[in-house]
């Protein structure tokens, strides 16, 4: 009666862990009978999950009941908690219950205590968390890149890792996608025949595949900062037409904007140590502090904050389904007193 508690905001890693459990437990020939995915936002479906998890698998292999947005350790009702407590004892050995939520389990809840008690005293439960590092946690972002590269059997040095962090940030899914592209490019360049030997990803390959797009985005950020919005929009449209992912573009722009705000704030409080400033601002290369200082010279904090606000609105708009270029136009072409008064 295994229960898997999987949580965190790194959706890529959570989904990978879930898929691995499904692949290990379920016989593909019987998946349509032995796999259920439940929406935890629906109280009725949660009760249905607890009913289904009491069923033994059909045919060969095991059974998996996955509850997305699970409430069992995050805002669980008394009725549901009581039902879970009754159900745990009835889960067959080959049936797995996966409870997935982006939020950390609430240790005050009876259900969380029940599951954690079983994790400590038994072998049928396990908890795994996958949280993305914060935008200013450079070491955490480096570790994220290192872990993904290790999983993909890649050889990568610290200088190259820093370049990826600077270009992409803490987007786990995008890091995974770009490293896979880099693997193919490296294989083509090096023509290695031994698939078991780690593929080396060089700084030059990263600059060729990733940083070129990042550089374009940073140029757009500078244009926006200087109020040249029409030119910036033309470059944005060109990038999008050439296949640049809209969310990667907005991630780079918000990352640059965040760096400007941090450096402005730290400078205004008299900070002079560029290494300390880089650490606090989440900037991998301390030398960029000098470049940023020149970029924001004469700009007010209000101007920088307003630009960040617009970029966050664009991101929210894109994620809600608005066509990317329309999201950029709708928000960047909106007049603002703060944007026009530096």
Image (tube, rainbow, N blue to C red):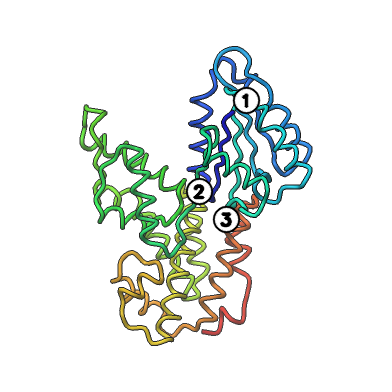
Q: Quadrant of residue 339?
A: bottom right
The answer to whether 332 is drawn above or below residue 247 in the figure is below
Q: Nearer the viewer, residue 254 or 5?
A: 5
x, y percent for residue 166 = 36, 60
Q: Quadrant of residue 311?
A: bottom right
Residue at 45% of width from left, 48% of height from top? 172
Tag 3 or tag 1, which sits nearer the N-term?
A: 1
The answer to whether 156 is drawn above or below residue 303 in the figure is above
The answer to whether 195 is drawn above or below residue 40 in the figure is above
The span from disc 2 to disc 1 (Cα, nearest Å) is: 23 Å
Mark 3: which secondary structure? helix
x, y percent for residue 263 = 41, 77
- Left or right of residue 281: residue 86: right
Mark 1: which secondary structure? strand
Label 3 Cα neighbours within 10 Å, binned few <14 / some 14-19 / many ≥20: some
The span from disc 3 to disc 2 (Cα, nearest Å) is: 27 Å
The span from disc 1 to disc 3 (Cα, nearest Å) is: 39 Å
Q: Nearer the viewer, residue 303 or 242?
A: 303
- Left or right of residue 67: residue 156: left
Residue identifier under label 3: 325
Task: Give the numbered dot on residue 10.
Answer: 2
Mark 2: which secondary structure? loop
Residue identifier under label 1: 35
């Amino acid at each position: 009666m295994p229960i898997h508690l999987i949580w965190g905001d790194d959706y890529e890693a959570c989904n990978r862990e879930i898929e691995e459990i499904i692949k290990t437990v379920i016989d593909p020939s019987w998946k349509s009978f032995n796999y259920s995915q439940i929406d935890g936002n629906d109280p009725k479906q949660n009760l249905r999950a607890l009913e289904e998890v009491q069923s033994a698998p059909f045919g060969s292999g095991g059974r998996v009941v996955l509850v997305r947005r699970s409430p069992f350790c995050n805002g669980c009702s008394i009725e549901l908690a009581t039902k879970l407590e009754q159900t745990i004892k009835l889960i067959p050995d080959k049936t797995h219950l996966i409870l997935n939520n982006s939020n950390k389990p609430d240790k005050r809840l009876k259900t969380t205590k029940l599951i954690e008690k079983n994790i400590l005293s038994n072998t049928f439960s396990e908890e795994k968390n996958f949280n993305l590092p914060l935008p200013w946690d450079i070491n955490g972002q480096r570790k994220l890149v290192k872990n993904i590269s290790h999983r993909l059997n890649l050889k990568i040095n610290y200088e190259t890792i820093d370049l990826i962090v600077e270009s992409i940030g803490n987007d786990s899914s995008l890091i995974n996608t770009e490293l896979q592209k880099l693997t193919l490019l490296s294989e083509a360049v090096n023509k290695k025949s031994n698939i078991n030997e780690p593929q080396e990803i060089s700084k030059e390959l990263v600059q060729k595949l990733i940083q070129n797009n990042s550089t374009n985005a940073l140029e757009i950020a500078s244009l926006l900062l200087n109020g040249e919005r029409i030119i910036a929009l033309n470059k944005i449209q060109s990038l999008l037409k050439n296949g640049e992912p809209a969310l990667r573009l907005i991630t780079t722009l918000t990352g640059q904007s965040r760096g400007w705000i941090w450096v402005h704030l730290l400078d205004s409080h008299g900070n002079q140590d560029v290494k300390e400033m880089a650490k606090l601002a989440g900037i991998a290369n301390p030398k960029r502090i000098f470049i940023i200082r020149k970029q924001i010279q004469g700009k007010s904090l209000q101007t920088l904050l307003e630009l960040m606000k617009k970029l966050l609105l664009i991101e929210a708009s894109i994620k809600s389904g608005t066509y990317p270029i329309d999201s950029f136009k709708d928000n960047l072409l909106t007049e603002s007193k703060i944007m026009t008064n530096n």
